[in-house]
Image (tube, rainbow, N blue to C red):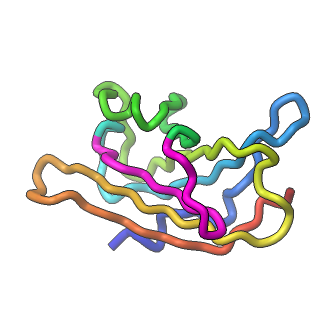
């Protein structure tokens, strides 16, 4: 379905604060439909075989950033078809230079579907240090 477009592989970059890499972020490609942030029922990120703790993930769309816990009850923020989201991973040092295997699993709860939608993508990426 939309799986292979979830991770935008050329949009991975380290996040720096005060000159220090505190994590990295990547663009989550456009969803298949417009929706609210609260539709994201689950978001799992794995880097080089290690799952990122839920509390270390942030999801941003439309200029607003949320923890996954906050997204569960966020009924105002929404994305439109064609909007990309930014997923931030808080990780000391960010991504080291070189290639990394980045995996994303996303569960969406859609009102008109009797079951949750799950998307999976994995790409080899580089944040350039």
Q: Provide residue 39's location: percent of width, then percent of height.
A: 28, 43
Looking at this view, name the residue that lies furthest to the right: 19
Magenta-colored span: 39-54
Left or right: residue 99 versus residue 97 is: left
Is 17 above or below relative to 43?
above
Q: Quadrant of the N terminus?
A: bottom left
Q: Main secondary structure of the magenta part?
A: strand
> Which residue is painted at 81% across and 38% down in the image?
16
Give the vertical position of 25 relative to 51 (above or below).
above
- The one nearer the camera, 51 or 86, is 51
Residue 33 to residue 101: above or below: above
Q: On the image, which quarter does residue 3 sit in?
A: bottom left
Residue positioned 43% across, 37% down in the render: 68
Q: Is residue 114 magenta?
A: no
Using residue 115 as the reference point, say whether residue 42 is left or right of it: right
Indicate yes or no whether the magenta region holds residue 40: yes
* Side of 104 where 72 appears, left or right: left
Q: For the C terminus, which image quadrant? A: bottom right
Q: Nearer the viewer, residue 126 or 44?
A: 44
Q: Residue at x 62, y 53 (%)?
A: 26
Residue 42 drawn at (x, y percent): 36, 50
Residue in view at x 60 percent, y 69 percent: 49
Image coords of residue 113 (percent x, y): 12, 57
């Amino acid at each position: 379905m939309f799986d292979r477009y979830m991770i935008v592989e050329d949009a991975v970059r380290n996040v720096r604060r005060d000159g220090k890499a505190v994590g990295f972020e990547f663009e989550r490609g456009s969803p298949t439909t417009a929706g609210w942030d609260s539709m994201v029922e689950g978001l799992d990120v794995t880097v080089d075989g290690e799952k990122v703790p839920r509390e270390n993930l942030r999801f941003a769309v439309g200029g607003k950033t949320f923890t996954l816990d906050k997204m569960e009850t966020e009924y105002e923020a929404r994305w439109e078809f064609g909007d990309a989201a930014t997923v931030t991973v808080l990780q000391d040092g960010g991504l080291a230079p070189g290639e990394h295997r980045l995996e994303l699993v996303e569960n969406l709860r859609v009102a008109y579907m009797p079951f949750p939608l799950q998307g999976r993508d994995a790409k080899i990426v580089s944040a350039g240090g």
